[in-house]
């Protein structure tokens, strides 16, 4: 499994359940690991043969501007689904954090891992059904 990653992307979004969080954008920090079986670009040296992290970045920034969700968990899931469906990832790890939520905490957040084509445990199916990997940071 080859992994393309984005580490420490910072964006602004409206997210949260507290009244103080529901109107003004706040900073969020995102890191992604995007797994593909083999990156052909290692041989071809062509951007078309890999995950274009610039395009992933733009899609995520667009999502941050428009998602309408309240929980980091739901936003992380939406990001995972986007990367799998639109960028051909077979596996993705999303770390999403609010670095400014509390004065005495560096950050709060979630880490999720999803894999293409695995039944989600709720009877879901289809080409982009998702599930917890649950075996660590790198897919097995």
Image (cartoon, rainbow, N blue to C red):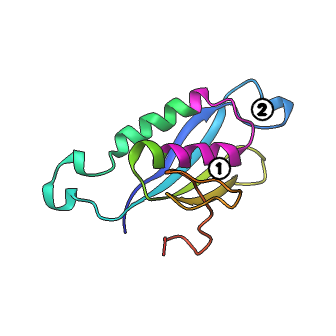
Residue at x 14%, y 56% (from the top left corner): 44
Image location of residue 115, percent across then percent down: 52, 60
Instruction: Find disc 1 in the rendering and name its residue.
Output: 97
Front residue of this view, candidates 13 and 101? 13
Image location of residue 1, percent across then percent down: 37, 69
Q: In the structure shown, which secondary structural element does the residue marked by tag 1 occupy?
A: strand
Magenta stretch, residue numbers: 64-82
Corner quadrant of residue 111: bottom right
| Residue 65 belongs to the span the image colors magenta | yes
Q: Is residue 51 left or right of residue 83?
A: left
Residue at x 21%, y 56% (from the top left corner): 41
Q: Residues within 10 Å of mark 2 (few under 14, many from 20)?
A: some
Q: Is residue 127 left or right of residue 18?
A: left
Q: Is residue 62 left or right of residue 53?
A: right
Instruction: Find disc 2 in the rendering and name its residue.
Output: 21
Image location of residue 74, percent across then percent down: 69, 44
Front residue of this view, candidates 112 and 8? 112
The overriding secondary structure of the stretch rendered in magenta is: helix
């Amino acid at each position: 499994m080859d992994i393309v990653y984005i580490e420490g992307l910072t964006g602004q979004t409206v997210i949260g359940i507290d009244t103080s969080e529901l109107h003004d954008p706040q900073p969020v920090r995102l890191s992604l690991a995007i797994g593909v079986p083999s990156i052909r670009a290692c041989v071809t040296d062509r951007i078309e043969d890999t995950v274009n992290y610039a395009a992933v970045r733009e899609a995520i920034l667009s999502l941050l501007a428009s998602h309408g969700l309240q929980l980091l968990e739901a936003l992380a899931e939406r990001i995972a689904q986007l990367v799998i469906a639109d960028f051909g990832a077979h596996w993705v790890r999303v770390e999403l954090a609010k670095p400014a939520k509390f004065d005495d905490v560096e950050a709060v957040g979630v880490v999720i891992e999803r894999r293409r084509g695995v039944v989600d445990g709720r009877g879901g199916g289809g080409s982009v059904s998702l599930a917890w990997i649950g075996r660590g940071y790198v897919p097995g």
